[in-house]
Amino acid sequence: QVQLVESGGGSVQSGGSLRLSCAASGRIFSINDMAWYRQAPGKQRELVAHILSGDTTNYADSVKGRFTVSRDNAKNTVYLQMSSLKPEDTATYYCYASVRTLTDRKHFPYWGRGTQVTVSS
């Protein structure tokens, strides 16, 4: 099967930066879109940044100009560079990927387990 493993979370002061990584592993044939979502306590999971296989990106309005999503297709990895962090960015960040395995005929959604980001004021 496919596993998505996030890394790079942690605690930082307001205005600081963090870089999240998410590596997909398993019997992967291809990956379409990849994305980062986040969920704060008591809130719904929301899309933060999305990147297509052709590197087209889109972002939540709340992170535009501060966050940058990128991917390394050779490594099946997606990154999220977060700068000018604010306390309201505090959440668990989840990686998403649409993956076709060697035995599938179409792509299916996969999720990582999440990594915590805490921004203090």
Image (cartoon, rainbow, N blue to C red):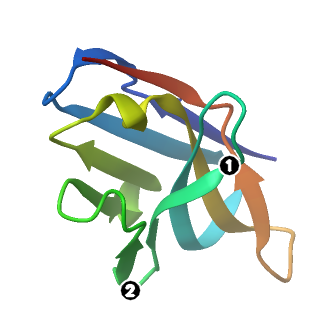
Q: Is residue 65 above or below residue 5?
A: below
Rendering coords of residue 26 (x, y %): 68, 47
**Numbered label tally:** 2
Label 2, residues with CA under 10 Å away: few <14, some 14-19, many ≥20: few
- Which residue is at a point 74% across and 54% down the rendered structure image? 110
Image quadrant where residue 32 sits:
bottom right
Q: Residue at x 81, y 47 (%)?
A: 1
Q: Nearer the viewer, mark 2 or mark 1?
A: 1
Q: Specify the amino acid type for callout 2.
A: Gly
Q: Which mark is residue 54?
A: 2
Q: CA distance from mark 2 to mark 1?
A: 25 Å
* Mark 1, other Cα within 10 Å: few <14 / some 14–19 / many ≥20: some
Q: Nearer the viewer, residue 82 or 13?
A: 13
Name the residue type under label 1: Arg
Q: Is residue 55 left or right of residue 103?
A: left
In the foreground, 61 or 28 = 61
Judged left or right of residue 5, residue 7 is left
- The secondary structure type at the circle numbered 1 is loop
Decide if residue 86 is on the left or right side of residue 4.
left
Give the structural element (helix, strand or loop) at label 2. loop
Circle 1 residue: 45
